[in-house]
Amino acid sequence: MGLLSYSSPIYEFNYSGDNNNYMTVGKAMMHGFVPYKDVFEQKGPFVYLLYGLASLISFHTFLGSAIFEIAILFAILWLTFKIGKLFSSTKVAFVIALFAPVFVLMEPYYSYGATVEFFLYPAMLSLIYVSLKAQQHQFIISKWTWYFQGCLVGIVFFSKYTLLGSWIAFYIFMFMYYTIKHRWNDVRNLIWSSGLGFLTTTVPWLIYFEMVHGLKQFFNVYFYTNIFRYGSVNGTWFERLSMSLWTFVQLLLFSNPVITFVIVLGLLFVFFSRKILAGWIIKSLLMIMMFTNALLALCGGTFGPYYLLAYFPYILVLFVLLIIALSHKLKLSAFKKWQSVFIFSWVFALCMTLSVNSNLQFSRFIPNNPAITSNLGVKHPTSSAQIEFGRIIRHESKGRPTLLAFGFLENGFYTTSGAYPTIHYFERNNISYHKLPTMMNTAANAIKHRKVQWVVICIKTTSNSNLQHQIETTYKKNAYGRGLKALNQNYEMRAHHSQISQGNDMEYVLYKLK
């Protein structure tokens, strides 16, 4: 994790737009701002709480996020070990767990790191573990396990509710199973213990938003805006669900051949296994959970490959089951020289992990890499736009700086500058103008009325045009013409910097209030 996450200190900065959104809103929440009411962003409040806590560890960097990421990866390793131990010896399970990072950190699904899908990965693994363990005990599940899963349902519901597919399938299936078997005590545990857990993690947020007079805005942004305005897929819910399922089929057929191999062979194993997965009940449950997760995970569309990380807990479990079946066939539990096996497996797993992710080429080990600068002629070490602009803003501002990311999904300028999002629409989210014109109009008015000291804009660069012409062409096309006119009247260009951002050659331009 320390080698491959952009949040790690061996990288200059985490340039991800989404991660910086969460950090900006989380940091603001820690200092009295109310998400949705004072600051517009559409993820759930648990995401901002996590990043807010991370900002308390390190205000201008992602060090706090890196610490949480390491903890999450350890949780994934531990749960993988626990799943393996259900069907094999401790030694075999330990070896299998070493390979879990391959199915967590694989590029492009894990790119910059610290996405919601990554942070909820252990939650989904824990549900799969509960399902597999339950089949070994006649599906008797303790009250505390139901309570814990109810807590997780609340956390996922108030983080990114499109990832609830697995729990929806699990709860419906188990309710029907207990009802058919007339196991009414288990039905009561399912309902009351899970319900109590759900209330434990959701009611405090509702109380908080009511106390700060932000409950209406919370429901409007997190539910209404996400469902009806946000997303790259339009049309009926049937069309959205179909597109989500088709994305999973594409992942299966046209992605990394290792993924295709594991999914196809793993599904065949689930169908035909008689020893590890005994009986149609657990097989049906796993298949339905996997299908429902695939159906709902991307029903709002996808803005990047990292959305597909939601599929990977199941891919990891299929891999675990395949390796366990192979170990039984080869009778590895009887093997004597386990110390050599551990060392070899650790080295091989590390090499495999590094082979499926190329982030190291953008680390501090390679100065002036494309993530830092597009100027190949630079001889002396330089910094990215985020670090350079952040330094300028901090040094030249009077008091706490005020900033606006105008016309793009901000990529870290609030974090490096230390600015709070004082404008409600502090950036342009992935919502079209005709669905939410207020977002662009508010930004343009903030520039017109000189409400912020600094403005950052972002354009895709081309080699056959000067910078000012590119700015005018880009912003007029994106319905920001009025804001651009006010920007030229009230602000002066202070700096500009080009670098690769999420695969595109971008030019960031910093403006200072005249």
Image (cartoon, rainbow, N blue to C red):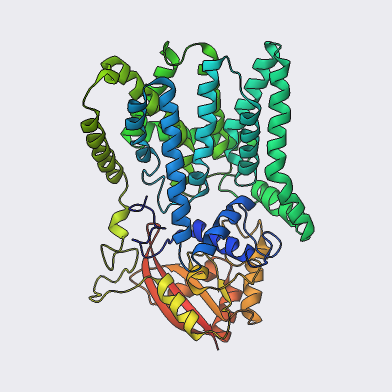
- Whether residue 462 can be seen here: yes
Relative to 509, 201 lies left or right: right
Q: Nearer the viewer, residue 188 or 245?
A: 188
Relative to 63, 346 lies left or right: left
Query: To which quarter of the image does residue 179 belong?
Result: top right
* Picture coordinates of residue 280, whole percent (x, y): 52, 12
- Whether residue 284 can be seen here: no
Query: To which quarter of the image does residue 382 belong?
Result: bottom left
* Picture coordinates of residue 324, whole percent (x, y): 35, 22
Count of marks placed on residues: 0
Give the vertical position of 204 relative to 194 (above or below): below
Q: Nearer the viewer, residue 327 or 247?
A: 327
Give the vertical position of 474 relative to 291 (above or below): below
Query: To which quarter of the image does residue 12 belong?
Result: bottom left
Q: Residue at (31%, 60%) from the top-left corner?
A: 363
Q: Nearer the viewer, residue 448 or 327?
A: 327
* Picture coordinates of residue 314, whole percent (x, y): 46, 31
Q: Nearer the viewer, residue 231 or 115?
A: 115
* Picture coordinates of residue 231, whole percent (x, y): 58, 48
Looking at the figure, which quarter contains the C terminus?
Answer: bottom right
Relative to 273, 418 lies left or right: right
Give the farthest residue toward the bottom: 514
